[in-house]
Amino acid sequence: MSELAQVAPAFVEMAHRIVWCSVASVDRKGRPRSRVLHPFWEWQDGELVGWVGTAATPLKRAHIEASPYLSLNYWEASQDTCVAECKASWHFDEETRTRVWERYKALPPPLGYDPAIIPGWNAPSDDAFSVLRLDPWRLRVFPGTLLLEGKGELLTWQEAG
């Protein structure tokens, strides 16, 4: 079993349980900027990909253009944390936007929701609804029990090279 195959399922379980994450990018001057987003992750055929429906604001577009690398940090009060360091890419095609929209609707709450509850998002074809694909190059899963009780296992994976 590959290292990614050991870490990815634990990462997905924790990320989907926590749901919301802080996402950090950098602007054109290299200054950090963070926001809270609601991605979901797909672990299939040895590949982990994250998807997030979001508005492609001029600020977000400029940050991704300056550097397509994002850091996603999930945390909850039990001290469970997981981090995905990712390369992000915008997807504006109708097929991807519809697939991500429908996937959000099909996922169980609290991860799943109807994107139409967001003001300005009435359908996946709306200009205000865009999709970011997240391709991780590094993952870290740190159960709070490791910190608080010395029980559990820190899991990490980093893409070779």
Image: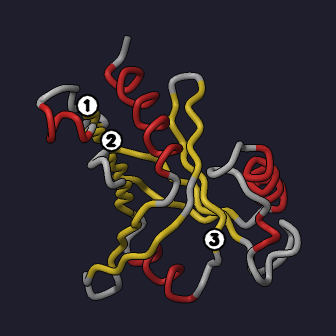
As helix, strand or loop, the secondary structure at mark 1 comes to: strand
Tag 3 near tag 2, CB within 8 Å: no
Vertical placement of residue 154 versus 66, above or below: above
Q: Residue furthest left?
A: 150
As helix, strand or loop, the secondary structure at mark 2 comes to: strand
Of the pair 6 and 96, the residue shown nearer to us: 6
Q: Who's the residue at 33% across and 77% down the image?
A: 26
Please provide percent x and percent y for residue 152.
22, 26
**Distance Cα–Cα, label 3 vs label 1:** 29 Å
**Amino acid bearing label 3:** Thr
Please state which of the two labelled residues, at mark 1 or mark 2, is closer to the viewer: 1
Graded by Cα atoms within 10 Å as few (under 14), some (14 to 19) or many (20 or more), the crowding at tag 1 reads some
Image quarter (top left, top right, bottom left or bottom right) of the C terminus: top left
> First in sequence: mark 3 or mark 1?
3
**Distance Cα–Cα, label 1 vs label 2:** 8 Å
Tag 1 near tag 2, CB within 8 Å: yes
Vertical placement of residue 31 versus 81, above or below: below
Please provide percent x and percent y for residue 93.
78, 62
As helix, strand or loop, the secondary structure at mark 3 comes to: strand
Q: Which residue is mark 1?
A: 155
Image quarter (top left, top right, bottom left or bottom right) of the N terminus: top left
**Distance Cα–Cα, label 3 vs label 2:** 22 Å
Image quarter of residue 56: bottom right
Vertical placement of residue 126 versus 52, above or below: below
**Amino acid bearing label 2:** Leu
Q: Which residue is mark 3?
A: 54
Question: In screen coordinates, is 15 left or right of 142?
Answer: right
Please provide percent x and percent y for residue 18.
47, 50
Q: Which residue is mark 2?
A: 139
> First in sequence: mark 1 or mark 2?
2
Q: Who's the residue at 55% across and 31% down the image?
A: 43
